[in-house]
Structure formats: structure tokens, C-alpha cells
Amino acid sequence: MACNLTAGIALGCRDNVGGLKTMWITDYTNIASLTQSTGDTITQISGSGTFYEFQLIRTSSQHTESVNASLENGTIFYQGECVTFFAKLDQAKRNILKTLGQSQQLAIVI
């Protein structure tokens, strides 16, 4: 049986650019409270300290979050992971990344 093709598919607008754009990181101890709306959207962060901006190259970074459940303990926790790429690594960037690896931090990804 032959299928009758009745229409084509037009190329749409480029409004679906994906990837991570920016990551903001601060030390976890700087956060006093987080306010969430419905779902997982954070609407307000209060506290003191500095948020540091890390500009990322789109399509070269990714964020994943997995849910981990323990039937033995009756607990659920979330583990987030950001994999990023920084071009032209030099000593100053290396020192920043080394400090990040040694501290507790909170990341907000856009």
C-alpha cells in the first residue's frame, strides 16, 4: 500500500539553543535561606558573601542530576554534577579550580 505524502516540514526559527550559559558559585556557608516556587525554581536567595560568575561555552558543558534512594535508610537525596570546559587553562584558572575542589560550594546554573 502506498502512503500519500500530503505536506512537507518547514525549518523553524532558531529559538531552541541549548547548553549551559553561565554558572554562579558561592561558598555554601554564605547562604542563609532559599525560597522556592512551585517545582524546583528558586525565586530568592538571601545571605552574605560573593557569587562568582563562570562564563561557559555552550554545548561544551552539561549538568546532570540523579535521584538516589536508600530503601535501608528510608532516605532520598539528589546528586548534581556539572561538567564544564574552560579553554586556555592558565595558572590563575588552575588556582580557582583547585580552590573549588577544596571547598563546599553551591552552584546555580543558567
Image (cartoon, grey):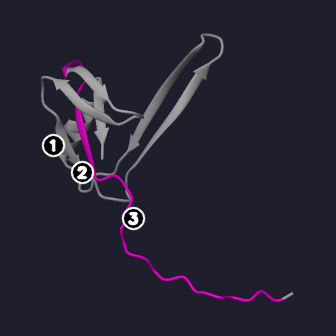
Callout 1 secondary element: helix
Q: Which residue does the numbered mark 3 point to in the structure image? A: 16
Q: Which residue does the numbered mark 1 point to in the structure image? A: 92
Indicate which label's residue lies in the foreground, 3 or 2: 3
Magenta stretch, overall SS: loop
- Sequence-earlier tag: 3 or 2: 3
Q: Which residue does the numbered mark 2 point to in the structure image? A: 89
Residue plotted at (23% across, 56% down): 88
The image quarter containing residue 49 is: top left
Q: Residue furthest toward the top?
A: 73
| Amino acid on which the number 1 mark rests in the picture | Ala
Residue plotted at (20% across, 37% down): 96
- Residue 50 placed where, x, y %? 13, 31
Query: Real-space Cα distance between discs 3 and 2?
Result: 30 Å
- Residue 104 placed where, x, y %? 29, 23
Asked if residue 58 is positioned above or below residue 25 in the image, the reply reads below
Q: Residues within 10 Å of mark 1 (few under 14, many from 20)?
A: few
Residue plotted at (54% across, 30% down): 67
Q: Residue furthest toward the right?
A: 1
Indicate which label's residue lies in the foreground, 1 or 3: 3
Name the residue nearer the viewer: 26 or 45: 45
Q: Which residues are magenta?
A: 2-30
